[in-house]
Image (cartoon, helix red, strand yellow):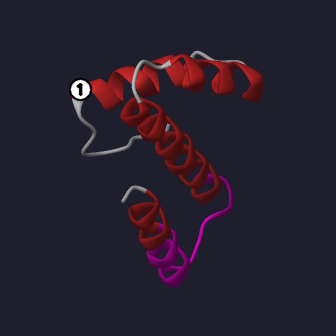
Amino acid sequence: MITIEGLTERQRGIMDLLWNCNDIEQIQTLISALPSKQDQYDARSLVLIATWESIEQELGYSKECKDAAARAIANSMR
């Protein structure tokens, strides 16, 4: 189970929609259908965060890798 802390209510709603997608095509369709550029940006960022979290859970990472991933995610959300 992936838990992403600190999301707004809107971002949690978008994440719920993303979890219901079965493949990348559905995710891409959903993102393009979101009403605002900010929602689309948030959705893309959430996909990246969820991907990193999944990889971390699957493979595990050293502290240095986790810190680098966190910085990359933070920079992508600017």
Q: Nearer the viewer, residue 58 or 10?
A: 10
Q: Position of residue 37 (x, y in %)?
A: 43, 33
Left-right relation of 39 to 32: left
Image quarter (top left, top right, bottom left or bottom right) of the C terminus = bottom left
**Residue occupying the point 44% across, 28% down:** 15
The image shows residue 12, relative to residue 4, as above or below, that is: above
Q: Nearer the viewer, residue 77 or 60?
A: 77
Query: Which type of secondary structure does the marked residue at label 1 adopt?
Result: helix
The residue that mark 1 highlights is 9
Magenta stretch: helix, strand or loop mostly: helix
50 inside magenta stretch: no
**Residue occupying the point 24% across, 45% down:** 6
Observer able to see residue 23: no
Left-right relation of 44 to 38: right
Q: Position of residue 43 (x, y in %)?
A: 48, 35
The image shows residue 78, relative to residue 33, as above or below, that is: below
Report the amino acid beneath label 1.
Glu
Q: Position of residue 25 (x, y in %)?
A: 76, 23
Q: Nearer the viewer, residue 69 or 43?
A: 43
Q: Position of residue 50 (x, y in %)?
A: 53, 44
The residues colored magenta run 57-69
**Residue occupying the point 39% across, 63% down:** 74
65 inside magenta stretch: yes
Q: Quadrant of residue 22?
A: top right
Disc 1 packing (10 Å; few <14; some 14–19; many ≥20): few
Q: Quadrant of residue 13?
A: top left
